[in-house]
Image (tube, helix red, strand yellow):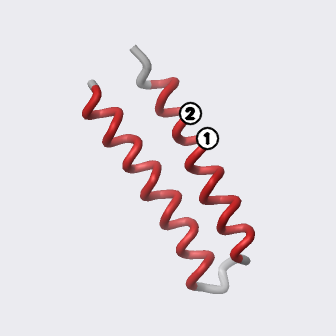
Amino acid sequence: MELNKRAAGGLIFALGLVAGLVGFMTDAYTPTVAVVLMLGIWFIGGAAVAFIKSD
């Protein structure tokens, strides 16, 4: 079960990183919005994974 939780955490990290990099490397949105999205995905996603995968 711990492996699935780590994999889900890695997926959340990767999604947040991609959301941030899109904002930093393109003109899709400002870097400030990129940071907010990145941190939001990490915090909310991490809490969701911890809540859903709790034993």
Distance (Cα) linking label 2 and label 1: 5 Å
Answer with the quarter of the image where residue 6 lies.
Answer: top left
Q: Amino acid at mark 2?
A: Ala
Is mark 2 in CB contact (under 8 Å) with mark 1?
yes
Residue at 45% x, 53% y is: 13
- Which of the pair 28/4 is nearer the observer? 4
Q: Position of residue 49 (x, y in %)?
A: 47, 33
Q: Position of residue 28 (x, y in %)?
A: 66, 80
Q: Position of residue 19 (x, y in %)?
A: 55, 65
Which residue is labeled 1 in the image?
44
Q: In the drawing, does residue 31 fall left or right of residue 47? A: right
How many discs mark residues in the rendered view? 2
* Badge number at residue 26: none
Residue at 38% x, 41% y is: 8
Which residue is labeled 2 in the image?
47
Q: Amino acid at mark 1?
A: Ile
Residue 17 position (above or below residue 30) = above
